Amino acid sequence: MAGVKDYGMIAVVTGLTQSQVADLTAEIMKVKENKAPGSRGTIVKGKAKDIGKLIQQRTPQITSSK
């Protein structure tokens, strides 16, 4: 059925500097707002060794600013 919103996405990117993480976070938020303004999301940032633990914790979600 076309248009059913039943997909999600997880991406883990490691080997970044703190500055690169900040830049990518900002860009993801901009694209999410443009391409899927009513969608929800979570961005988890931290040390690569802690990513699994951080993903499992509840974190604030990115929601539409409108």
Image (cartoon, rainbow, N blue to C red):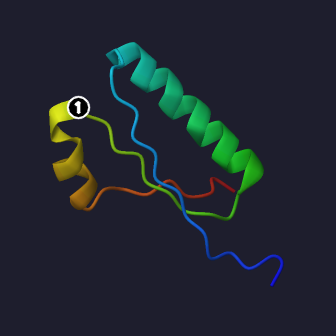
Query: What is the quadrant of the C terminus in the image?
Result: bottom right
Within-10-Å neighbours for mark 1: few <14, some 14–19, many 20+: few
Placement of 8 over or under 55, stated as above or below:
below
Residue at 16% across / 51% down in the picture?
Answer: 53
Please tell me which residue lies in front, 51 or 59: 51
Query: What is the quadrant of the N terminus in the image?
Result: bottom right
User: x, y (%) of residue 47?
Assistant: 20, 30
User: x, y (%) of residue 27?
Assistant: 60, 31
Q: Give left or right: position of 62 versus 48.
A: right
Placement of 52 over or under 31, stated as above or below:
below
Residue flagged by tag 1: what amino acid is it? Ala
Disc 1 is placed on an element classified as: helix
Q: Which residue is mark 1?
A: 48
Placement of 8 over or under 19, stated as above or below:
below
Placement of 61 over or under 3, stated as above or below:
above
Please tell me which residue lies in front, 7 or 45: 7
Please tell me which residue lies in front, 62 or 50: 50
Residue at 23% across / 31% down in the picture?
Answer: 48
Q: Residue furthest right?
A: 2
Residue at 46% across / 53% down in the picture?
Answer: 10
Q: Give left or right: position of 31 versus 9.
A: right
User: x, y (%) of residue 21?
Assistant: 41, 25
Q: Give left or right: position of 61 versus 31.
A: left
Residue at 63% across / 53% down in the picture?
Answer: 65
